[in-house]
Image: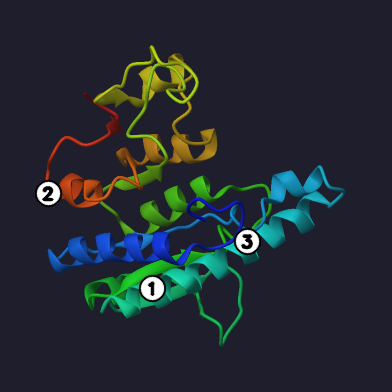
Amino acid sequence: MGDDNYGIDANTLATYAQQINKVVEKGVQVGIVIGGGNIFRGLAGTQQGFDRVKGDQMGMLATVINSLALQQALENAGVKAKVYSAIRMEPVCEYYMKEHVIADLEEGFVTILSAGTGNPYFTTDSASALRAVEIGADALLKGTRVDGVYTADPEKDPSATKYSVLSFDEAYEKRLRVMDMTAFTLCQENDLPIEVFNMNARGDLEKLLSGEQVGTVVCNEK
């Protein structure tokens, strides 16, 4: 939503598409999971009187809207992209199947995996970890508003310091909020490293995938 309070900011969307295009041009296969908080947050919906299941379903649909918007932005930038949904909604997008996603990645498509896991009570963190494990990804890149994992919230504590590398066990022991515990445990058990970076810092995605030290790496061994 960029600097807006709601919805989709076209400039922000175009910036993301341009950055993704640069890494695709390098031959990187990219799968993307997007949240829907700029439109509707399921958990917040319960505070407005929505049943949790209904609220989460609305949140899943919000991720589909964002995914379709990103697909269009990528195609405008000359990138082949396809949206998959964990909830059947043809002809809006294809139903998620691991084999189809892998085939599309090998054909050079950016695959956008929407609607979370298709189940309530699971976050898009959990969806991204699940999809990454399913398709055999080399790493899970978590784009946030900050440039890594810190000893405390850097937006609230100016004395917070950033970790360059962190083990799963250390992150858990220090109660560092990297991802929700379901996603975190799934990555740890499947030896899938998490790389946390600032998705709004132009060029950082390309630097990260070129092997530069960007953000924080969370893995089983330092």
Q: Nearer the viewer, residue 204 or 63?
A: 204
Whether residue 203 is visible to the viewer of this picture, yes or no, is yes
Give how far across and how far down residue 45 sits, in percent.
76, 49
Q: Tell me, for residue 210, which label it has, or none.
A: 2
Q: Amino acid at mark 2?
A: Ser
Disc with the residue nearer the chain's start (1 vs 2): 1
Q: CA distance from mark 1 to mark 3?
A: 20 Å
Give how far across and how far down residue 67 sits, in percent.
48, 68
Give how far across and how far down residue 189 sits, in percent.
39, 36
Q: Secondary structure at mark 3?
A: helix
Question: Badge 3: how crowded within 10 Å, few (<14), some, or many (20+)?
Answer: many
Q: CA distance from mark 1 to mark 2?
A: 23 Å
- How many badges with numbers are in the image? 3
Q: Nearer the viewer, residue 8 or 161?
A: 8
Q: Amino acid at mark 3?
A: Met
Give how far across and how far down residue 153 sits, in percent.
46, 22
Looking at the rendering, which quadrant does residue 178 occupy? Answer: top left
Q: CA distance from mark 3 to mark 2?
A: 32 Å
Q: How is the image coloured?
A: rainbow
Q: Of discs 1 and 3, which sits in the foreground? A: 1
The residue drawn where x is 24% and y is 25% is 164
Disc with the residue nearer the chain's start (3 vs 2): 3
Marks 1 and 3 close (CB-CB < 8 Å): no
Question: Badge 1: how crowded within 10 Å, few (<14), some, or many (20+)?
Answer: many
Q: Secondary structure at mark 2?
A: loop
The residue drawn where x is 25% and y is 25% is 165
Residue at the extreme top of the image, as rendered? 159
Instruction: Name the residue that disc number 3 marks.
Output: 60
Disc with the residue nearer the chain's start (1 vs 3): 3
Q: Amino acid at mark 1?
A: Ala
Instruction: Name the residue that disc number 1 marks.
Output: 73
Quadrant where the image shows the C terminus: top left
